[in-house]
Amino acid sequence: MWNDWTTLQQIYFCIALLFSAVLLVQLILMIIGIGSDSGEGVDLNGDGNPDVTVDGDSGPLFTVKGLISFFAIGGWVGFAIGDGSLKTGWVILISVASGLVALVAVGFALRAMAKLQTNGVMDINNAVGKVAEVYLTIPEKCSGTGKITVELQGRFTEMAAMTENDEPIKTGSKVKITKTDGTTCFVEKIF
């Protein structure tokens, strides 16, 4: 089989096999959660700051994943058409064009996926001014904490709450969040 192929096919087969294997390893690592799709980079010295940015998925079209796709797709196309029926120049041109299409397609796909990502970090300061419902009674004059439920950043969440009112605020009451201290909401009862 190997000896039946042209030299050009053998070269393209080696390129395609190598980069397809790398693509497969990337896919497996991504599925099990080890691959870094965040574009944050690699921390080599353990100080918490990325030392090398490997793949800016939301940035340019020319990413590591895109280049691997370029060589894998271009290699397989070159292998498929490099049987001697076309001149070598045409085989190279068609395989490079196919690789470029794969590179651009992966770049656009990664950009589209990056737009779908959200931070997911809840910022309690976004709760100020919102109306919430008391879940656990809030003791009077900041003598303890109760709990409220509020819709914040597109999801319902439970938060610790205190009040400066002279009376406790009972479960089921509606309250307005007036301020936060970073962990606890301060509320006033809505009459």
Image (spheres, rainbow, N blue to C red):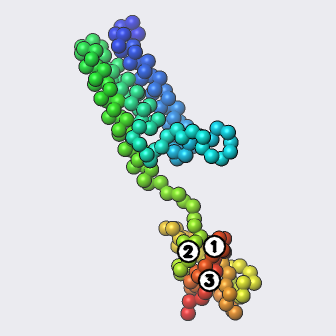
Residue that appears at 67% across and 90% down: 165
Residue that appears at 28% across and 19% down: 91
Q: Are marks 1 and 2 in contact (CB under 8 Å)?
A: yes
Q: Is residue 81 visible?
A: no
Which quadrant of the view contains residue 97? Answer: top left
The residue nearer to you, when weighing 165 against 137, is: 165
Q: Amino acid at mark 3?
A: Val
Kindly identify which numbered label has been placed on residue 159: 1
**What is the CA distance from the residue labelled 1 to the residue labelled 2?**
10 Å
Vertical side of 105 occupied by 19: above or below: above
Vertical side of 13 occupied by 182: above or below: below
Q: Position of residue 83 (x, y in %)?
A: 30, 14
Which quadrant of the rendered structure holds the C terminus? bottom right
Q: Which residue is mark 3?
A: 187
Per the image, label 3 sits on a secondary structure element best described as strand
Q: Residue furthest right?
A: 143
Q: Which residue is mark 2?
A: 127
Q: Amino acid at mark 1?
A: Met
